[in-house]
Image: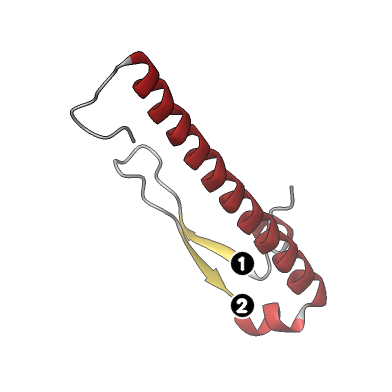
Amino acid sequence: MKIVSSDYSQLIRAASPTVATETPPVSGTYECDVDGMRASPGFLNDFEITQSNHAFHVGYNARVSISLAELHRVLDEVLGISHEEPPR
């Protein structure tokens, strides 16, 4: 998988780190050379591919989540299980 920020470090620089130990996690911040990004055909191609892959995975994961929720509902119905709160 392509990591655009690593491959184009001259265009994208980490300004502050991600802090995964915080609850909720704190996302890092970045400084971008927007003009350089627009002028770089390689960056634009890689960005488009990365964006398309992200959209595919988000959509696919949403369909899986919906399917699992439906399976949970059917199993609860068949097994006679009820929950005080809806399953997440």
Determine which residue is flagged by label 1.
12
- In the rendered structure, are the residues bearing label 2 and label 1 in contact, judged by CB atoms less than 8 Å apart? yes
Q: Is residue 3 above or below residue 71?
A: below
- Front position in the image: 85 or 18: 85
The residue lying at 62 percent from left, 49 percent from top is 57
The residue lying at 39 percent from left, 18 percent from top is 78
Mark 1 closeness class: few <14, some 14–19, many ≥20 residues within 10 Å:
some
Look at the numbered disc 1 and give the secondary structure of its residue: strand
Q: CA distance from mark 2 to mark 1?
A: 7 Å
What amino acid is found at the position of numbered circle 1 in the picture?
Ile
Q: Residue furthest right?
A: 42
Q: Quadrant of the C terminus?
A: top left
Determine which residue is flagged by label 2.
33
Question: What is the x, y in percent for residue 4?
Answer: 69, 59
Question: What is the x, y in percent for residue 38?
Answer: 70, 82
What amino acid is found at the position of numbered circle 2 in the picture?
Asp
Question: What is the x, y in percent for residue 65?
Answer: 49, 39
Specify which label sits upstream in the sequence, 2 or 1: 1
Among the 4 quarters of the image, the one containing residue 75: top left
The residue lying at 65 percent from left, 85 percent from top is 35
The residue lying at 36 percent from left, 37 percent from top is 21
Q: Is residue 40 above or below residue 88?
A: below
